[in-house]
Image (cartoon, rainbow, N blue to C red):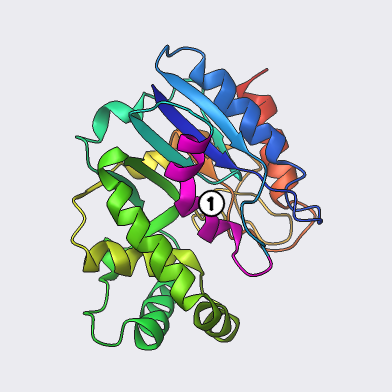
Amino acid sequence: MNIVFIPNINLGNSRNTPYHYSIKSWQKWSKQYDDVKVIEWDEAIMDFNKFKITLQRYWVHDILKHNKIEYEQVLVVDADTIIHPDCPNFFNETQDKFGVTLNNGCYEWVTRSIRDWGNACFPNVPKVKPWKYFNGGFQITNKKHIPFYKDVQEYYTQHIDHINNIGNQIKAGTDQTIINYLVQQHNIDTIYMSEAYNLQDLFRKNLLHIPGHSWFPDELRFLEAGWIYHFNAIPQNDRHVSYWMERTYKELYK
């Protein structure tokens, strides 16, 4: 059995309001495969004011074991995603490696994050190359990676105060750049999967029509550009994450 693990924690704000569209799209997609199960993780295991949810997801193997859930591979995917009903079964493409997708978005943000987190937390480690930098919102792992995840947990636990302090200063990522450094440092065998499985930064790719900002027609052209749509980095406006997730879900799952 392969697991789609979707963190969807209510943090006391309205951020996760539209995420039910994500859950429903993944559930409907998974029904065509006997070996895929969707799990919505809705209960933090630590104080999220200290350990952000993006950090707690690296306890995924422990959570599955605690709940006696058997699995071969698990995709940990962000809840601000919608999957196309015709998306192929990407679990068949991992070659038993750590599966990720490149962070193909704002390279100013990426290079700044690599530099500043590297200087603050990994001063003696070679800088991660931007063309090897993956997005944290799509990670496929398996039981072979449990020892590595234990090392990740230990790193976060030992350095959490420093991480939070630096994060407040840098304002360019939390776990994402750290996990990139740790994967490089531990020489984890990684496969970079198609961007179609994590189509990010849609606004910067001129794929979201924002009135007053966009010169192109108001169409869902991104549906032709990938299989999984990640609604991150959308500027504040009347058409924010909730609008796009609802519209996309209703278009795909009429």
Examine the rendered structure and indicate whether residue 4 appears above or below residue 77.
above
197 with respect to 145 (left or right): right
Residue drawn at x 45%, y 53% is 58
Examine the rendered structure and indicate whether residue 82 appears above or below residue 178.
above
Q: Which residue is mark 1?
A: 202
252 with respect to 181 (left or right): right
Label 1: element kind: loop
Residue 179, quarter of the rendered image: bottom left
Q: Is residue 57 magenta?
A: yes
Examine the rendered structure and indicate whether residue 37 appears above or below residue 162.
above
Magenta residue span: 49-66
Residue drawn at x 69%, y 67% is 49
Q: Residue 227: image x %, image y %?
A: 44, 33
Residue drawn at x 39%, y 46% is 139
Q: Residue 180: image x %, image y %?
A: 33, 64
Q: Amino acid at mark 1?
A: Leu
